[in-house]
Every structure is written in structure tokens, then in C-alpha cells.
Amino acid sequence: MATILRDLSYRYQWLYDNISRVAALAVGGEGRFRQLALQNFDWQPETRVLDLCCGWGQTTALLVERSNCVTGLDASPNALARARSAVPQATYMEAFAEAMPFPDGSFEVVHSSAAMHEMEAEQLRQIFQEVHRVLVPGGWFLFSDFHAPTNPLFWPGVAAFFWLFETETAWEFVQTDVPGLLESIGFCDVSQAFYAGGSVQVLRAKRAAG
């Protein structure tokens, strides 16, 4: 069930934007948060990249600086309209992440930022399966999202944010063994890094070559 503040944050874009900025302060601001999964990765101008659940293009703007072949996908037509205006260098597709309208092996990289915690358990599995399908063998899935804090000092802030702005899916997500789920689907070389007292996780996972 969505909270009142969550409903308001989606109704009023300025409120959503400010919430996002405040939430990202723990990792040094929204700009740094959006780059966590992208840093120290070998990018080429011709790398085909999918920005999954791209929203209004906050990270898409960073991806088009690294690649000339960026596609943003989101289920919200309003978000995509804003993304097209803000980042016209990318191509956009309106669709659900668990049923992507792309052929197998369409991308070398799939990226997502702070979106997977919105998904129910079975939906999350379906999305990971779809990501695996649309990646080329040897392609990479890069994403950042919430995690249960390893430093107890961060729990009050995370809990307050979830109670005010998130739903039960966020609570379920931070209890999920995400690396284990990715491996069960067929990903390999799964790595996990933590920031902000463990309240943010960055994962990288590769579709096995061959």
C-alpha cells in the first residue's frame, strides 16, 4: 500500500525531485548516486546500453556521455516525455520491464537506478530473466538500489524514508538475497558493493559467454 506522501511525490514533480535529492545526500548527492553503478566500467562509444526504468532521464543523461547507442525504457508516458525533452540523444520505449519488446541479445549493458525495490518478488524475478535475455553473452547488468543497512546508525533514516515514501516492496527488497537471485537465473561474476553504511548496494552481474 502506498503512503500519502508517496502519492503526493508522484503527483507533484518538484516534491519527488527534492525527495530524491535529500535521499541521495548519504552517498554525496544525487549526482554521485547516479554514477555509482557506472564508475570504473569500460565503456565504448558503440556500446548498446539500455537504461531500464529510466524515469525522466537522470541517469540516461550520464549514459549518453559514454555511449552513442542508449535506449531508455519506462512504463510511464509522463516520465518518458520529460526524458525525451531532457535527454534527446537517447531513444525511448514505453513498456514494462518484465516484458521488454526487444529481441534476444539486444544490448551489451543494461543499467537501472533505484527502481528494483519497487517490484514485487515474482515481478523482480521476471525482470531479471528479461535482463538476462536481452543481454548479449558476456554483457553486463549494472544497478544500484537500497539495502538493509549494515551500520545500525543508518537504520532510522532508511526506515523513516520507507514509511513515508515507499511501499512493502521496498521492505521485501532489502531482505532479498539479490546476488543469489541473479545467480539462480544464470548470471555469473556477480559483485556487490555497499555505500552509506550499507543502505545502498551496487551490483554488477554478467551473462555468461557462450
Image (cartoon, helix red, strand yellow):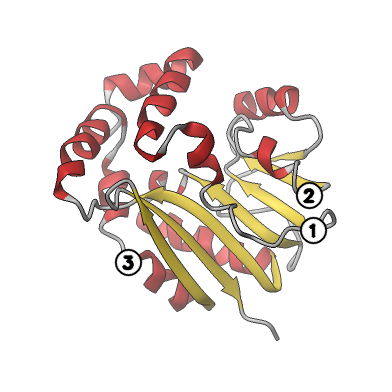
Asked if the residue under mark 3 is in contact with the one under mark 1, i.e. CB atoms within 8 Å, the reply is: no
Measuring 42% from the left and 15% from the top, which residue is drawn there? Answer: 15
Marks 1 and 3, the one that precedes in the sequence: 1
User: Of tags 1 and 3, which is closer to the observer?
Assistant: 1
Marks 3 and 2, the one that precedes in the sequence: 2
Quadrant where the N terminus sits is top left
Q: Quadrant of residue 62?
A: top right
Instruction: Name the spot of residue 119 as percent of width and height, x first.
Output: 41, 48
Label 3: which residue?
177
Instruction: Name the spot of residue 100 as percent of width and height, x first.
Output: 65, 53
Name the amino acid, label 1: Gln
Q: SS class of the residue under badge 2?
A: loop
Name the amino acid, label 2: Ser
Label 1: which residue?
44
Instruction: Name the spot of residue 191 as percent of width and height, x first.
Output: 46, 69
Drawn side of residue 67 relative to residue 131, left or right: right
Q: SS class of the residue under badge 1?
A: loop
Disc assigned to residue 67: 2
Q: SS class of the residue under badge 3?
A: loop
Drawn side of residue 101 relative to residue 177, left or right: right
Name the amino acid, label 3: Asp
Drawn side of residue 137 relative to residue 67, left or right: left
Viewer-closest of 36 and 96: 36
Asked if the residue under mark 1 is in contact with the one under mark 2, i.e. CB atoms within 8 Å, the reply is: yes
